[in-house]
Image (cartoon, helix red, strand yellow):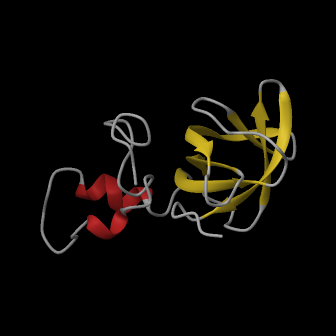
Amino acid sequence: MLLSGTDFNMDRTPIEASISWIINYNHDFIGKEALLEMKNKDHEVFRGFKMIDQGIPRHGYGIYKDNEKVGVITSGTMSPSLKIGIGLGYIKKDIKVGETVLIDIRGKKQRAEVTKPKILP
């Protein structure tokens, strides 16, 4: 579940927050043109992360791919059922579900798998 003020806020669109299914484009509304343009441009998307290495991703931790910062964690914890660190955050949309990224956990980059926001075993 998205946590208001942490995982999304007034600075993020439904497209970025991966909840674009809530948008009904069949009528005019303020911001419709901007959202339609955004669909075809580079932007970040909301994704889940399952830690491969030990560690717990926390709010504000950087996400890296090929030595480039590509996103940021918005929230994270230790999953009591999966027994691993999990997190949510925003990442460049060209990084796909299933890819491995690095999360900077207190100065040490740890491997994590990109998932859909609903993190499953």
Left or right for 37, reference 10 = right
User: Which residue is nearer to you in this view: 62 or 84?
Assistant: 84
Q: Is residue 93 above or below residue 105?
A: below
Residue name at image x 62 percent, y 34 percent: 58
Going 28% across and 57% down the picture, which residue do you hit?
Answer: 33
Residue ID at (67%, 67%): 97
- Left or right side of 110 for 74: left
Of residues 109 and 69, the one nearer the viewer is 109
Occupied quadrant, residue 18 = bottom left
- Coordinates of residue 3 in the picture (x, y in percent): 38, 43
| Left or right: 65 in relation to 49 | right
Q: Eyeballing the image, is 104 above or below 77?
A: above
- Taking the view exactly as shown, the residue that stands out farthest to the top is 107
Q: Position of residue 23 (x, y in %)?
A: 26, 65
Residue pictured at 60% horizontal, 39% vertical: 73
In the figure, residue 28 lies in which quadrant? Answer: bottom left
Q: Position of residue 120 (x, y in %)?
A: 60, 69
| Horizontal and vertical percent position of residue 72 | 62, 38
User: Could you tell whether 67 is left or right of 37 in the image?
Assistant: right
Q: Quick one: quadrant of the N terminus?
A: bottom left
Q: Quadrant of the C terminus?
A: bottom right
